[in-house]
Amino acid sequence: MSRVWMLCLTLALVACSPSGRPVNPPWSQLTEQEQSVLAPLQPEWNRYNPRKKQEFLALVGHWASLTPAEQTNVQLHLYDWALMEMPDRQAARRTFDRIESLPPAARDAALAELAERERVREGREPAAGIETPDAPSAR
C-alpha cells in the first residue's frame, strides 16, 4: 500500500503538463534538472508512454515548491515505481484514478487514510485504534 499511497500523492502534484516541448521526449532531450529529478526512472524512461512521461515531467515543475524532505521522499518513491511490476503499477493507477474522481473532501479523507496506513506500515507513530502486528490495540 505504501507504493500506491506515494504514487497517488506524487501524481496528485502533477496537475498540468509542460507546454512547448515534445509530447514524448526521449531521455536525451530532457533538461539537466529533469534528468536529476527523474533519475530513478532513467532505465525505463524511453519505454514509458507519452501520457506517463508528461505526468512525471509535470512533477519537475512542482519540485521547487517541495521541502528537501518531500523531495527525498518523492524520489524514493520514484525508485519504488521504477521497480514495480506491471500489475502493481496498474493497481496504483486504478487507486489514483479512483481518488482523483472523488469530491475534494472525500479525496482529502482518502489521501489521509492512505497516509495513516503508510505510517502504520512503516512503524512510525502507530495510529490510535488501528491494530498492527507490532502494536496490538488494548482490548
Image (cartoon, rainbow, N blue to C red):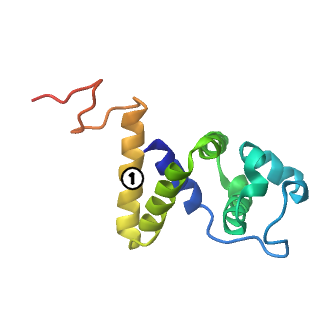
How far across and down, in percent of the image, does residue 92 sit?
A: 49, 55
Q: Which residue is mark 1?
A: 112
Q: Is residue 89 visible?
A: yes
SS class of the residue under badge 1?
helix
Relative placement, left or right, of 92 versus 139 is right
In-image side of 30 versus 52 (left or right): right
At a point 42% along the width and 45% down the height, the residue shown is 1
Seen in the picture, residue 25 relative to 4 is either above or below; the reply is below
Point out the residue furthest to the top here: 134
The residue nearer to you, when weighing 88 against 65, is: 88
Of residues 130 and 90, the one nearer the viewer is 90
Percent coordinates x, y for residue 31 in the rendering: 88, 56
> Residue 121 lies in what quarter of the image?
top left
From this view, report whether residue 30 is shown above or below residue 106. above
Q: Residue at x 37, y 58 (%)?
A: 110
Which residue occupies the extreme left position in the image?
139
Q: For the C terminus, give its image quadrant.
A: top left
Quarter assignment of residue 55 = bottom right
Q: Quick check: 52 above or below 125?
A: below
Left or right: 79 in relation to 20: left
